[in-house]
Image (cartoon, helix red, strand yellow):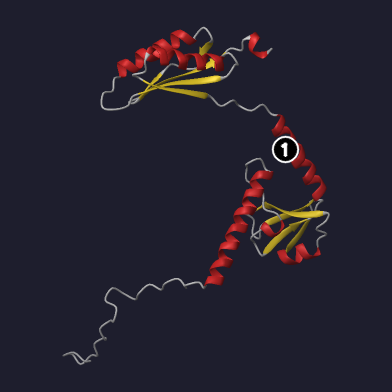
Amino acid sequence: MTNNSGRQSPLPSMFPGGAPKTRPPILSGKALLQQRIQERIKERIEKVRKEESGGQERAARDEEIQSAIVTVISEEGVVLGAQPLAKVLHEMDRSLYTLVLVDPQQDPPACRMFSRKLIYEKERLARKQRAAAPKKPRPQTVVMSESIGRHDLLIKIGRARDMLAKGKRVTMMVESKGKHRSSVKRAEVGEEIVKQLTQHASVCAPPVLEPNTWSVTLQGKVVASTIL
């Protein structure tokens, strides 16, 4: 097609908005299954790594290392240079050593050989220390409505008193429900709770008054008769 100046005009585009975006290939049923299996394997590896490290991220090892080329460091700390990961794993005595990613920022990533026995002993000791470490007690929570009756309030306070007598930490919470909400009523119920329980516990922090709740956390004092 030519215009008045004799120049050939470009053909009108078949796609006014630009070339259409290519769609990702549609996977067959078998390929999709394989993809899901690989994803589950990766999830399982990540879960095992976190369990072994106490919930913390553990350095990648052996086939977990993503780079095809790695900088190899011997068990003694000697840099052996860049080598294909597959070659290193094939030639290494896997029954005695494991390859651990020590510096993923290096190019190629630095990996060091470690004794499997040494790593096992360190992880076993770490698990033993975590198991022996005192666990922070979770506060128990006693919830009630601001419109609670006197009888039910005393029952709730009695439950809290029993837990506090065992040295537990208890959070008392007064909730507002429905259309008629009163911060004054919540505070009154809260004051009664503190009055009834302070002889059995210490207040961890001043009461917290929020739009729909009043709460206070108490730390119990162990009573000798409860541990006999």
| Residue appearing at x 44%, y 8% in the figure | 195
Q: Quadrant of the C terminus?
A: top right
Number of numbered discs on residues: 1
> Foreground: 174 or 45?
174
Counting other residues with Cα less than 10 Å from the Cα at mark 1, is it few (<14), some (14-19), or many (20 or more)?
A: some
Snapshot quadrant of residue 113: bottom right
The percent coordinates of residue 189 (x first, y second) are 37, 14
The percent coordinates of residue 3 (x first, y second) are 18, 89
| Residue appearing at x 41%, y 73% in the figure | 22
Q: Quadrant of the N terminus?
A: bottom left
The percent coordinates of residue 67 (x first, y second) are 64, 62
| Residue appearing at x 81%, y 45% in the figure | 118
The percent coordinates of residue 29 (x first, y second) are 53, 71
| Residue appearing at x 60%, y 62% in the figure | 38
Q: Name above or below for residue 200 compared with residue 83.
A: above
- Examine the rendering and report whether any part of residue 183 can be seen: yes
Residue under pointer 1: 127
Q: Name above or below for residue 129 compared with residue 62.
A: above
Of all residues, the one furthest to the left in this rendering is 4
- Examine the rendering and report whether any part of residue 84 can be seen: no
> Foreground: 96 or 110?
96
> Foreground: 116 or 3?
116
